[in-house]
Image (cartoon, rainbow, N blue to C red):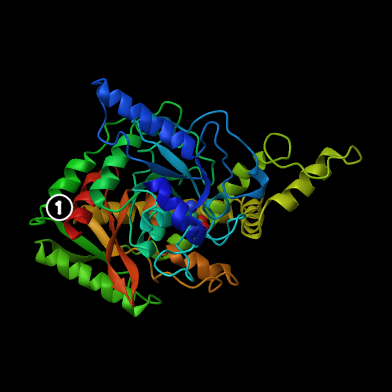
Amino acid sequence: AFLDRIEAVDGRVHAFLHVDAEGALATARQVDADRAAGRALGPLAGVPVAVKDIVVTKGLPTTAASKILEGWIPPYDATIVARLKAAGMPILGKTNLDEFAMGSSTEYSAFGVTRNPWDLNRIPGGSGGGSAAAVAARMAPLAIGTDTGGSIRQPGAVTGTVGGKPTYGGTSRYGLIAFSSSLDTPGPVARTMLDAALLHEVIAGHDPRDSTSIPQPVPPVSAAARQGAEGDLTGVRLGMVREFGGDGAEPAVLAAYQAGVEALVKLGAEIVEVSCPHFEYALPAYYLIAPSECSSNLARFDSVRYGLRVGDDGSRSLEEVMSATREAGFGPEVKRRIILGTYALSSGYVDEYYGQAQKVRTLITRDFEAAFAKVDALISPTTPFAAFEFGARTSDPYQMYLADLYTIPSNLSGGPAVSVPVGLADGLPAGLQVMAPTMRDDVAYRVGAALE
Ligand code: GLN
């Protein structure tokens, strides 16, 4: 049914870069056979899933939406993909994204934009616009995203889907094409908090192949989503961040958020104002740390080891071939970040830029710790604006970067956060974000599920 739906609507939405009908059906048949044979099956066996095309899949093209990786077929599975397969989940295909997950609209994909199913003239968010649009258009019941600065939650908010960013280190990065290694976090995209929680539990948990993976039990997120769905938040204290005053946010988005806050109060939650004075520096700190780490990570695309090679006709030096390949293979936003990151890490500037940003990161983490001494979770709008029209924010990079104003603090601290749909803003979906302490993903799921 999902493959039929993809066939019927993806020509208009373009959520998928690659569909693997045969592979998905083979897994589905295997699950049927296992069921018939009375073998034990996990809770999501047979439930299809779409995977963001920055996560490597053995035998299936993986491009990170970049020309530089076009034609590359990975020889191995990411840990999270291996876990999807072990759970009997058919993989429908690979979803579109901003090139190397750098962007907030999926307009920076080298293979064309994804359209928001709510309005085909508008962006589906980014970088994981393909995963969010696939779920929103009912082409997949579940999808995998990656969140470095908001790329699961922001697309969730603008497509009316649920997006969960697990605690950093709670889900394995092994087999994610690295963007910013100290921030990259894979997680679930779904229609409901409970669906997201069940997928979270399939992919999460310690992985010895990822040096920053946390060797602790997975937080009980599905139990928390079920508890939340009972609709009682008595005794739960939620903090609204004073510094997220809403300057520059769209009034209709703030109104949808405000209605969500009132609903939380009706469910028994106590809302208090808290101060996180360093949150206003999160965006500039992120836009030094993420490009710095990206400039180092993307050095591996050297025209020799993977994908594209340009100008290798025997007359050019290795450096000339490398340079021609990168010139042709990387898009403008990726080049901008590599240049910025290389500069920020260069001798003489590294302390002034990267070092300062890391200090700001520590201050933001301390703001969270101080807030969580007073409240169970923090809430905010997920995004300052609803889905915008194509082209509206591509001429000025800063306008695009603003999309992640509210999502970036929890990337910098590493704490978990979810986005849950909270009604419509002028006919377009809006999201409410719940941020919880590190390894307390369950708190975020409980509050999110109560709001549904
Ligand atoms: N929009 C942010 C950026 O461009 C976040 C991307 C992400 O989370 N992958 O870096």
Displayed quadrant of residue 307: top right
Displayed quadrant of residue 363? bottom left
Count neighbours of disc 1 (C-alpha within 10 A) and say few if under 14, some if 14 to 19, many if 20 or more.
many
Q: Residue at x 43, y 36 (%)?
A: 24
The mark tally for this picture is 1
Instruction: Inspect this view and state whether residue 150 appears.
Output: no
Q: Quadrant of the C terminus?
A: bottom left
SS assignment at label 1:
helix
Residue on which the image places disc 1: 229
Camera-side residue: 443 or 8?
A: 8
* Residue at the (92%, 40%) spot, across then down: 315
**Residue 24 shown left or right of residue 113 in the figure:** left
Judge whether 371 appears above or below 248 on screen.
above
Taking depth in this image into account, of 415 and 36 the one nearest to the observer is 36
Q: Nearer the viewer, residue 280 or 21?
A: 21
Q: Is residue 90 above or below residue 231?
A: above
The amino acid type of the residue labelled 1 equals: Ala
Please state if 49 lies on the left or on the right of 234 as rendered.
Answer: right
**Residue 152 x, y percent position in the rendering:** 40, 53
Relative image position of residue 127 (x, y in whole percent): 49, 56
Q: Is residue 11 above or below residue 317?
A: below
The residue that appears at 39% across and 71% down in the rendered structure is: 386
Q: Can see residue 108?
A: yes
Percent x, y of residue 119 = 43, 70
Q: Against 224, is 331 above or below?
A: below
Residue lying at 55% horizontally and 32% vertically, measured from the top left: 59
The image position of residue 361, as x and y in percent, is 43, 53
76 left or right, relative to 213: right
